[in-house]
Image (cartoon, helix red, strand yellow):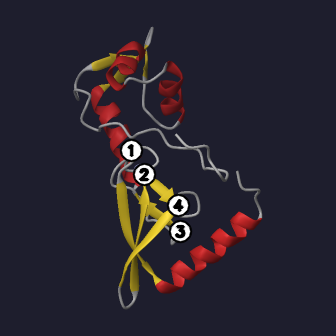
Amino acid sequence: MRAPTTEKPARRQTLKSARLARAHWLYSIEDVIALYLVSRQTVRNWMRYGLKAIEAQRTLFLGQDLNEFHARRRKEAKVPCTFEEIYCVCCKQKHSFLIEPFTVGQKGKLFTLVSVQCPETGGRTTKFVRESDLRRLRDLQKRNCSAQTPD
Ligand SMILES: [Zn+2]
């Protein structure tokens, strides 16, 4: 992996499947850790973030609640991109044109095809960008570059 050149936003963990848990089963914290391959702290974070738990002698989760929680997380992650962002089909996250180097491709009348290489998977993802947005991007990039010492 490359060293980040600008301050990166905290990278969101990969979203979990909303169909992994059996709706009517009960899961202990250990079961949840094993099911989603996450740490105890992650499960605690999920609870803080609204994952319903049953407080018995030990904390239990209903499968249906686990699935609903992850379905909600997936829905929330579907926030439209801003002009400087691209949704990556490779890693299902957003990348910023201001962080990842982009390549300008095919030019249309109103839009230009711009692509970035996914830093996670190495795949390529593309987006049509308006001419005016491309100019804005280049201006922002120039400003970023001059504000930093190149490595
Ligand atoms: Zn990606």
Circle 1: element type: loop
Of tags 2 and 3, the one toward the viewer is 2
Identify which amino acid the numbered label 3 is placed on.
Glu
The foreground one among 110 and 66 is 110
Residue 84: numbered disc? 3
Residue 78 is drawn in which quadrant?
bottom left
- Residue at 39 percent across and 56 percent down: it is 88
Residue 121: numbered disc? 1
Where in the figure is residue 114, as x and y percent of width and height?
Answer: 42, 71
- Disc 2 target residue: 118
| 73 to the left or right of 64 | right
Identify which amino acid the numbered label 2 is placed on.
Cys
- Disc 4 target residue: 101
Neighbor class of circle 3 (other Cα within 10 Å; few <14, some 14-19, many 20+) is some
Neighbor class of circle 2 (other Cα within 10 Å; few <14, some 14-19, many 20+) is some
Q: Are marks 1 and 2 in contact (CB under 8 Å)?
A: yes
Of tags 3 and 1, the one toward the viewer is 1
Distance Cα–Cα, label 1 vs label 4: 15 Å
Image: 4 above or below 129:
above
Neighbor class of circle 1 (other Cα within 10 Å; few <14, some 14-19, many 20+) is few
